[in-house]
Amino acid sequence: VPRIGPGGAGRTSEDAVWRDAIQLAINAPSVRNVQPWRFRLRRGVLELHLAPEASADAGDAALRTVTVSCGVVLHHLRVALRAAGETPVVELVRDPGPSALLAIVRLGEARVPTSEDRRLAGGIVSRHTQRAPFDARRLRGEFLDRLAVAAADEGGFLDVLRGARRDAVCRLLTGEDLLLARQAPALAVLSGAGDGVREQLEAGQALSAVVLEAAAEGCAVGFLDAPLRDPTARARLASFISRGETPMVLLRIGHAEPVPREPRRRLDEVLDVRESRGHPVPTHPGAQP
Ligand SMILES: Cc1cc2nc3c(=O)[nH]c(=O)nc-3n(C[C@H](O)[C@H](O)[C@H](O)COP(=O)(O)O)c2cc1C
C-alpha cells in the first residue's frame, strides 16, 4: 500500500520516513565514535553496510566492536521507525561477503506507536557515554533485571557482576579503568551467542537495547574495553560469565549528569539514496542537523 504523506506521492513520503529515522538512529554510540555504518536506500529497501574504511586496517578485536557498533545503529533505527509508527522488518545477512552488506530493512504495516516506543526513542536523544565517575545514586535490582531482559530480547546476554565475580573482573583492570569500575553502581558484561558477524550484530542490538533502556530511566553507561582487547584478559573474562557466550563489551552503569553530545557525521555522508536506475538523489536538506 503506497504511503500518501503531506508531500504527495507515496515514495516521497516514505523516503522522508527513512531519512528522519536514520537521522535519529545515527546518534548511536560506536567504538571511538567511528560511526562505521553506511546506508543505501533503493526503492523502499534500506541496506546497512559496514563502512569500508572502518574495517580496512582493523584487527579481529577492533573489527568485532566495529560490527557490534553497526548492530547498535540497526537497533536504534528500529526504535526510531517504531516511534514513527512503522514496523521495521529486518533481515540480517547470513554470510556478509566483501560487499560488507550487513542487513536489509523494509517497512511492514503502519502502526500506532506505543508510549513504550516513544520512551525508548527518547533515550536516543538523551543518551551519552559516561566517561567520568558516576554519582552516588544506587541502582535497583529490578532495574538491572529489566536491562538483562532487554538484552535477552535481542539475542544478547547482560551479566551483572556481583561479589567474587565482580572482584575477579576488576583484577583484569588497572589505573583509571580500575577506579571507574570500582566506583560504578553496576558492572556488567554484555555478550553474544557466538563470535560470527551475525552474533556480533545481535549483540550490538542487545547493547543498544540496554543503553536506551538505561537512558530512558535517566541512567548512563560507560565502556571499559581493555580486557576485551587483550586475548588473555578476554579469555579470563569469558570464563567468568556463565554459559560460554562471547564477551563483547564490559559496561559500567549508573547515574550521572548529562554531558555535551559528541559530533556525528551528516546524514548525507552516511546515506546514499538512489532511484532505480542509479541516479543519486540529493539528501533532503531539512533532514540534516
Ligand atoms: C561497541 C562499543 C565500544 C566502545 N568502547 C568504548 C571504550 O572502550 N571506551 C570509551 O570511552 N568509549 C567506548 N565506546 C563509546 C564511544 O566512544 C562513544 O559512543 C562515542 O565516542 C560517541 O559518544 P556518545 O556515545 O557520548 O554519543 C564504545 C561504544 C561502542 C558502541
Image: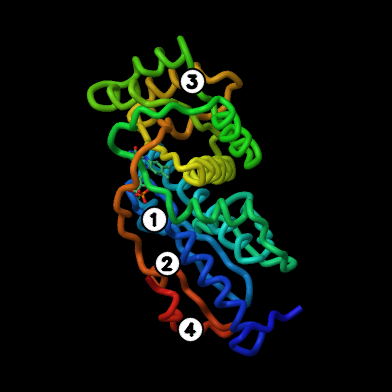
Q: Is the residue marked 4 within 8 Å of ligand 1, measured from its CB?
A: no
Tell me the quarter of the picture where residue 53 sits.
bottom left
Mark closer to the chain start, 1 or 4:
1
Residue, disc 1? 35
In space, the residues marked 1 and 3 are separated at their CA atoms by 29 Å
Looking at the image, is mark 2 or mark 3 nearer the viewer?
3
Mark closer to the chain start, 2 or 1:
1
Q: Which mark is residue 256?
A: none
Residue, disc 3? 161
Quarter occupied by the C terminus:
bottom left
Q: Looking at numbered disc 1 in the image, what kind of residue is underneath it?
A: Gln
- The residue tagged with tag 3: helix, strand or loop? strand
Circle 2/circle 1 CB separation < 8 Å: yes
Mark closer to the chain start, 1 or 3:
1
Residue, disc 2? 270
In space, the residues marked 2 and 1 are separated at their CA atoms by 9 Å
Residue, disc 4? 281
Residue in the picture at 35% in, 32% down = 224
Mark closer to the chain start, 4 or 2:
2
In space, the residues marked 1 and 4 are separated at their CA atoms by 22 Å
In space, the residues marked 4 and 3 are separated at their CA atoms by 49 Å
Tell me the quarter of the picture where residue 82 sits.
bottom right
Looking at the image, is mark 4 or mark 3 nearer the viewer?
3
Residue in the picture at 51% in, 24% down = 160
- The residue tagged with tag 1: helix, strand or loop? loop
Q: Looking at numbered disc 2 in the image, what kind of residue is underneath it?
A: Val
Q: Nearer the viewer, residue 7 or 41?
A: 7
Q: Is residue 193 visible?
A: no
Mark closer to the chain start, 4 or 3:
3
Circle 4/circle 3 CB separation < 8 Å: no
Q: Is residue 3 visible?
A: yes
- The residue tagged with tag 4: helix, strand or loop? loop
